[in-house]
Amino acid sequence: MTQHDIRTAARSRDAVLSRDSGMAKVTALSWRAGAAGVVAAGLLTFALGHHAAASDVPAGHQGSIQIPAQPPGQAAGSGQVTSGAS
Amino acid sequence: MTTGAITTDTFEVFGTTAVLLVTRSSAIGQARGIADRLLAAVDLACSRFRPDSELSRLNAAGGKPALVSTTFASLLAAALRAARLTGGDVDPTCGRALTGLGYDRDFAELRASGDAPARLMGPVGPVPGWTRVRLDRAGRRVRLERGAQLDLGATAKAWAADKCADQIADQVGCGVLVSLGGDVAVAGQPPPDGWEIRVTDDHAAPEWAPGQTITISSGGLATSSTTVRTWTLGGRKVHHIIDPSTGEPARSCWRTVSVAAGTCVDANTASTAAIVRGAAALDWLHDIGLPARLVRHDGTVETTAGWPYNDPGDAA
């Protein structure tokens, strides 16, 4: 093997190593970008879902049916108005 | 009309009778003006029988998102809250079920037409469910999924009564009672002995009709019944309170339920849910502490959570 052949072989090895190293870096970057995308999508889904759920109800008194401040009292007569179905 | 210190105004709205009472006679005109403006806005937002209402347009949108008014967003939010608090027993997606029962026009027109036309497509089945309604309240956008069709009848009238009473009390500064077809809301300083209300099956019943008279000083009172808004469908008597699990009129052991609550919309939510839940409603109302009067089909009465003694002679 001549000196020229030895230099050519060495350059070829370096080129292959550089290519493999570059591919590894690109693959790692792709995985990181993909993982970040998944996390971001999850956070966005949670935030929007929470917003949608929260916006379905009016502010205040969301948690339960309100009981009256005082229970109804007994009365006689026909009343000032009638509560019945319509 | 003035009775003692109380002044009354009676008028027609939403196909039913509205009654406005104020504790200062000079305030009645201003109070009526406030009520008229608010009720007109509610009708334009959510009438099922007006093609130009937001609700009609949304129901016809084929699942596409629609931009809605603040009033409509608030009305829908109240309906979705009622659905959530009752585990879906009071569900706003019963529009198609009611239409399937022939209730596709103003009720007076439906009743006058006699027997409603039979369904074209057979039983509707369970309603799509309130979780099919997407409301972005901040963005005022609504989308109906999977063919859901809205009817806000279970909460809209009560919501309107609450808003009318609150706005009148705030702007006029007197005690006020608003009754919209028997859905009652009060606000401001009440009369010394409270507001006297006759509770019976039908809000338009004569004063000698069986029932019970009670007083409230705050919040709201609502009555739901299977005996009033009824019509015939193919010779079968049906009513407007839909059981969401079947899409059919609820088969309840109660003919009428009246509930007092912190607001009229909460009272109506509970009274409607009680009709749908049937016998289980007694324990439910007791557990959450809501005073209620429940009338069976034979007229016997049950009460819960501090509802005043019901004289058997008053049995409905």
Image: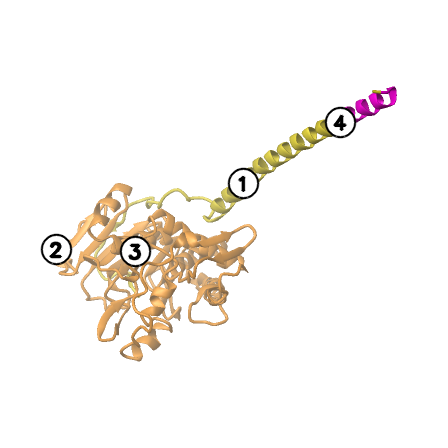
**Which one is earlier in the sequence, the residue at label 4 or at label 1?**
4
Instruction: Tell me the number on the disc at residue B312.
Output: 2
Could you confirm whether marks 4 and 2 are on the same chain? no
Q: Which residues are magenta?
A: A2-14
Whole-number angstrom distance, CA of label 2 to CA of label 1: 56 Å
> Circle 4 sits on which residue?
A18
Q: Secondary structure at mark 3?
A: loop
Disc 3 residue type (three-letter): Ser
As drawn, the chain in orange is: B
Whole-number angstrom distance, CA of label 2 to CA of label 3: 35 Å
Identify the subunit bearing mark 1.
A
User: Which dot, 2 or 3, sits closer to the camera?
Assistant: 3
| Of the pair A17 and B118, the residue shown nearer to us | A17
**Magenta span: helix, strand or loop, mainly?**
helix
Quarter containing the N terminus of chain B? bottom left
Quarter containing the C terminus of chain B? bottom left
User: Which dot, 4 or 2, sits closer to the camera?
Assistant: 4
Disc 1 residue type (three-letter): Ala
Kindly identify the residue that appears in the image at 26 percent across and 55 percent down: B276
Does the rendering let one see residue B308? Answer: no
Question: Marks 3 and 4: CB-CB under 8 Å?
Answer: no
Residue B272 position, x and y percent, is 30, 56
User: Which dot, 2 or 1, sits closer to the camera?
Assistant: 1
Disc 2 residue type (three-letter): Pro
Q: Residues within 10 Å of mark 2 (few under 14, many from 20)?
A: few
**Which one is earlier in the sequence, the residue at label 2 or at label 3?**
3
> Circle 3 sits on which residue?
B245
> Circle 1 sits on which residue?
A47
Identify the subunit bearing mark 2.
B
- The image quadrant of residue B8 is bottom left
Identify the subunit bearing mark 3.
B
